[in-house]
Image: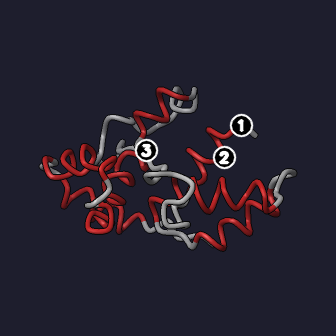
Amino acid sequence: MHHIPRLMVLGNYALQRGWDPAQLTAWFHEAFVDGYDWVMLPNVTGMSQHADGGLMATKPYAAGGAYLNRMSDYCGNCAYDPKVRVGPTACPYTAGYWAFLDRNAEALRDNSRMRQPLAGLARLRDLEATVEQERLRGDKPP
């Protein structure tokens, strides 16, 4: 499986929702044929979940629906709109991205690569509704 579906779809979703990085890495070990430590630890723990303190990646590998739409063909027939944050057609990746930034803004404040996204977060007029929608969505791993 290419890194876009693996890291930017599965890993990004888990990162946005705060899933346990160790449990996610264990799942990747079981689910993928190349699930070796030398592959999964840097890719999942480091890049995808930013759970190594920034050793592998200088910023979280998080993105909204617009990035997924640009980098893949997954959004074409999707019922969700990658440009929408709130409402029945709100993309879970777009809304999840902003909820992730809001939840982690303090921890990311000193990361120079996060200045622009955090400035965008500060300008969102529907941030409270976006965060509440994602809280209600739940999306906890089984």
Label 2 belongs to which residue? Answer: 6
Numbered label attached to residue 76: none
- Residue 57, percent from left and from top: 52, 52
Q: Nearer the viewer, residue 114 or 93?
A: 114
Q: State which tag comes first along the sequence, 1 or 3.
A: 1
Determine which of the numbered discs, if any, sits on residue 2 in the image. Answer: 1
For image coordinates 35% across by 68% down, the residue present is 135
Distance (Cα) linking label 1 and label 3? 17 Å
In space, the residues marked 3 and 2 are separated at their CA atoms by 13 Å
Residue placed under numbered mark 3 in the picture: 63
Picture residue at 54% right of the left edge, 69% below the top: 19
At 57% from the left and 73% from the top, the residue drawn is: 20
Instruction: Tell me which label, 3 or 2, sits earlier in the chain.
Output: 2
Residue at point 53%, 70% (across, down): 140
Rendered view: 127 above or below 142: above
Q: Residues within 10 Å of mark 3 (few under 14, many from 20)?
A: many
Residue type, mark 3 in image: Ala
Q: Is residue 2 left or right of residue 75?
A: right
Residue 97 lies left or right of residue 49; in this view the side is left
Marks 2 and 1, Cα distance to the nearest angstrom? 6 Å
The residue carrying pointer 1 sits among few (fewer than 14), some (14 to 19) or many (20 or more) residues within 10 Å by Cα, namely few
Residue 132 drawn at (x, y percent): 27, 65
Disc 1 residue type (three-letter): His
